[in-house]
Amino acid sequence: MMTLIPKTNLDFISKRWIFFGISLTLMALSFVSFAVKGLNLGLDFTGGTLLQVQFSQPAGIDAVRSALDKAGINGVSLQTFTGRNAYAISVKGKQENVNVIGNKLKDALTAGLSGNAFKVERLEYVGPAVGRDMTKKALWAMILSFFGMIVYIAFRFSNPLWGAMGVIADFHDIIIVVGILSLTGKEIDLVVIAAVLTIAGYSINDTVVTFDRMREHLKLNVRMPLGELINRSINETLSRTMMTTATVFLAILSLYFLGGEVIHNFAFTMLVGCILGTYSTIAIATPLLYEWAEGRNSKKQSQQPEKPQAIAQQQQGYSKKARKNAQNTPV
């Protein structure tokens, strides 16, 4: 059988502090970006103007978007109505600017699609109430999914801390992904929120595969040092992880370049999350588990010498007392 990725024997655990340093730096940059630039929230969360028009002749979505781009109107969300030559055009903006924005949209369509008359079916302000409701539901979905992950991994691996490490790695991925969206100024809408939730599931899947191999080695190699056991488990699953990541990455890459403007931000978020999900499994989840186990073992070892020391002191006290009694005993 042909092997695309040869067997590796890399020492990941010894590089764990380098990994932690990289992750802490990326998370710090993300929080700085949150504070300085903030998030570019989409129409779903901010509200804006909705203009619905129907053309007298067929007009392609690319032609409509091109007409709006030429007029300098960015951040537009387009929705088509099949069989009606109609489009719903949404642009972020305040409620008092509905008529101003609506006139700009109509002028852009008239100039960019000359000869194709249209009539306005709707012009109104769309509030962010739906976006707030969906955000609340998305947050609850994320919290419940994280709780479910901890319970599932605790049941499967007989230790809730394994699940906690997987969830910490998930938080790491989500914070950095949203930080990159903030740094690049990408618009965050409900589709991007769906991508973030998908990333959480993708990341924990890789982590569970590695944890499962670690569990097998814990049963078969009881005396193997934990660092060596983790390194062996990661190396043995590395080929599978890289092949899966490459397959997903190529599929998302094609969506990014060929999928069009509508799913551009979704594909970008998935590309970043795909890389981070693989990285966090190798560099965050398993090294954190190693640090916790080693810290626990060190604590036990530091407590064990206390008993022999107490016994030695007690024996020394008995010997002194015996010598004193012997000196005071008359011959």
Image (cartoon, grey):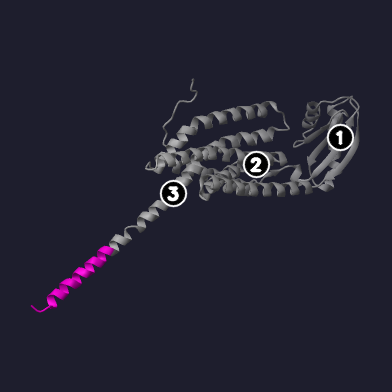
| 321 part of magenta stretch | yes
> Please, which residue is most extreme toward the top here?
2
Residue range in magenta is: 311-331
Residue in the picture at 54% in, 40% down: 208
Q: Position of residue 327 (x, y in %)?
A: 12, 75
Mark 3 to mark 1: distance in Å?
65 Å
Residue 28 in sight: no
Instruction: Look at 15% across and 71% down and name the residue there.
Output: 323
Callout 3: SS: helix
Q: Main secondary structure of the magenta part?
A: helix
Residue occupied by mark 1:
106
With 85 as the anchor, is 167 left or right in this view? left
- Residue at (32, 61) in percent of width and height: 306
For the residue pair 101 and 168, the one nearer the viewer reads as 168
Kind of residue sitting beneath label 2:
Leu
Q: Which mark is residue 197?
A: 2
What residue did someone put label 3 on?
293
Label 1 near label 3: C-beta < 8 Å? no
Alpha carbons under labels 2 and 1: distance apart: 37 Å
Badge 1 local density, few (<14 within 10 Å), some, or many (20+)? some
Specify which label sits upstream in the sequence, 2 or 3: 2
First of labels 3, 1 by sequence position: 1
First in residue order: circle 2 vs circle 1: 1
Q: Quadrant of residue 120?
A: top right
Task: Give the quarter of the figure containing the C terminus.
Answer: bottom left
On the image, the x and y values in percent for residue 52 come to 86, 36
Question: Is label 2 in a helix, a strand or a loop?
Answer: helix
Q: Is residue 124 left or right of residue 183?
A: right
CB contact under 8 Å: marks 2 and 3: no
